[in-house]
Image (tube, rainbow, N blue to C red):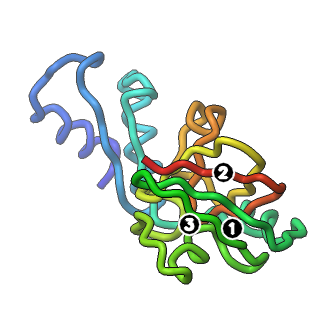
Amino acid sequence: LNPVVLKETLKVLPDWGKDKTEYFICGPTGFMNLVTDTLQSLEVPQEKVYQESFFIDNDKATNAAQEKLVAREVTVIYEGETYKFTVPPDKTILETALENDIDLPFSCQSGVCTACLGKCLSGKIKLEADGGLSEEELKEGYVLTCVSHPLTENVVVEID
């Protein structure tokens, strides 16, 4: 696949207009970069392009590992139930919940698919990876429990 072939392929799709068409990209990094660059060259608005990649940004993972984590109690609200449990420093919120027989939603467990999406209502959380979240979601306090570690006391996460 190259930019010329990709542009030709896009021409055979129905033309619903740039404001109505959304593009979903999933695949290896090189492929996703090619498609993203090609869509940019076609002036497709960035907010109409969605990506899902199955890798962890090693720089972010290394930075997260360097931060000192300690065991902290976390409250998770899910399906009308409230669960409290202590998350050890070497486990994520999701891992600890599952070990405590709390059946939370998840899929990839690497911070990109957003199946474990929750909103941090209080406290602070450190994310090992945030590739599955938009800047707006991060600002609004959304987290991915599969890559989340509590940084403060009083962490409360609500999962819809």
Tell me which label, 2 or 3, sits earlier in the chain: 3
Residue, disc 2: 156
Residue, disc 3: 146
Say which of 7 and 56 sits in front: 56
Q: Nearer the viewer, mark 1 or mark 2?
A: 2
Crowd rating for badge 1 (residues with CA inside 10 Å; few <14, some 14–19, many 20+): few
- x then y, percent, for residue 36: 43, 41
Q: Nearer the viewer, mark 3 or mark 1?
A: 3
123 relative position to 147: left or right: right
Secondary element under disc 1, as helix, strand or loop, is helix
Residue depicted at 81% across the width and 73% down the height? 71
Residue, disc 1: 58
Amino acid residing under circle 3: Cys
Say which of 76 and 38 sits in front: 76
Tell me which label, 1 or 2, sits earlier in the chain: 1
Q: CA distance from mark 3 to mark 1?
A: 16 Å
Crowd rating for badge 3 (residues with CA inside 10 Å; few <14, some 14–19, many 20+): many
Q: Nearer the viewer, mark 2 or mark 3?
A: 2
Crowd rating for badge 2 (residues with CA inside 10 Å; few <14, some 14–19, many 20+): many
Secondary element under disc 2, as helix, strand or loop, is strand
23 relative position to 91: left or right: left
